[in-house]
Amino acid sequence: MPVVRDLRVLLRLRDFRNLLAVRLLSQAADGVYQVALATYVVFSPEKQTSPAAIASAMAVLLLPYSAIGPFAGVLLDRWRRRQVLLFGNLLRAFLACTTAILIVAHVPDWLFYASALSVTAVNRFVLAGLAASLPRVVAPAQLVTANALSPTAGTLAAVAGGGMAFLLRLLASDSNALVVLLGAALYLAAALVSLRLAAGLLGPAHPPGVLHPSVAEGAALTVRGMAEGLRHLAGRREAAQALTAMTLMRFCYGALTVTLLMLCRYSWSDTESEGLALLGMAVAVSGAGFFAAAVVTPGLAGRLGTHGWITVCSASAAVLVPALGLFFLPGPMLAAAFVLGLATQGAKIATDTVLQSRVDDDFRGRVFSVYDVLFNIAFVGAAGVAALMLPADGQSAALVVGVAVLYALTAAYMLRRGDVPRETSPRG
């Protein structure tokens, strides 16, 4: 197969292998750290977890992406990217060790969150640096395959890291700090592997005579660029519609995620280990839904159009969320986790395709920065709303019905505005 042949060619490139290894180790550490943070907040025996605590944890994990992400490129165009990968991972290893000490010391929550926030903030620079470095280690003709392989492999590494964290947490009682130290070890390994890349290999290249804006000027240009991206998006009805629908669906997914966490912690288990095992199962089932979406979306979006497929995803969720969720039982909720994983990821693939095809190339980066901000803020905002509505056991019929109504309104909005021509549909 051509894809297999291309992958073999890429993996023979030493610099690509080294950069990929940095990504795998770094994102595996991210998975470990995120699970460690979530389990410390939700499943620690000494804590009485509340929806508000979960919302705070989600804000710590996601808001740095929204606040820092659009500005990361300003500094990445000034700093050597190999050094960003080296010192960024070294810094995260140190900060993760600090977080482990804070967990053992039982410090106030705000100090723990400040430490965790620092780790996730640095993460944005490392991920952006990995993406920006890829064209420096492969030929232009290999870039599409490299872009398909690297992020997918990184996501799988993050899932594997999360799995290791779940396993360690189940095997060793009271092991939150130990899980964080595992993440720190992986960050350190990523930093050491980055030393196998030459310091100047990953760029950026600064040709003589080319003036670069200062950091302050670059930040101002970034803000102005995002405003221009919004104006451009406003004139592209199909793209704006898909992005609006995806933001609403992400909000729904976030509210139900907090609900599931509370159900695993208090309604379905008598011990923290049982609740953690149920949560791990729910994450795996939802991940299977994501994988299923990758398989079925190209064919279904090809027949229905991208907007038609987003409509089907949101309408299906509107029907199945109350049908499965109002029982508040593990079996139906796990089925709902699969359906929502499929629907959310299917809609995201379609939305990505619409934006890529309907937004002018000169504005695409700025529009995707807006997309990234909306995607994460919607999730955190949903967690905040859930914190206001959910009781301690996570069983809120009002929230489930409200989410179903929002899914239905999203489907109606997509139907009212029409469809995008089928040539924008993703192809497998």
Image (tube, rainbow, N blue to C red):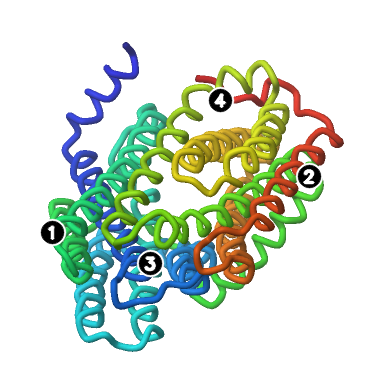
Dot 1 or dot 3: first in sequence order is: 3
Tell me where residue 284 sits by quadrant: top left
User: What amino acid type is highlighted by mark number 4?
Assistant: Thr
Compared to residue 39, the image places residue 251 above or below, namely: above
Spatial separation of the CA atoms under disc 3 and disc 2: 32 Å
Residue 18 placement (x, y as % from top left):
18, 45
Residue holding disc 1: 192
Q: Where residue 297 is drawn, which disc sits there?
A: 4
Taking 212 as reference, is 38 left or right?
left
Q: Residues within 10 Å of mark 3 (few under 14, many from 20)?
A: many
Residue 410 placement (x, y as % from top left):
75, 43
Q: Residue at x 39, y 59 (%)?
A: 206
Indicate the secondary structure of the residue bearing disc 3. Answer: helix
Spatial separation of the CA atoms under disc 1 and disc 4: 39 Å
Dot 4 or dot 2: first in sequence order is: 4
Of 35 and 92, the residue lying toward us: 35
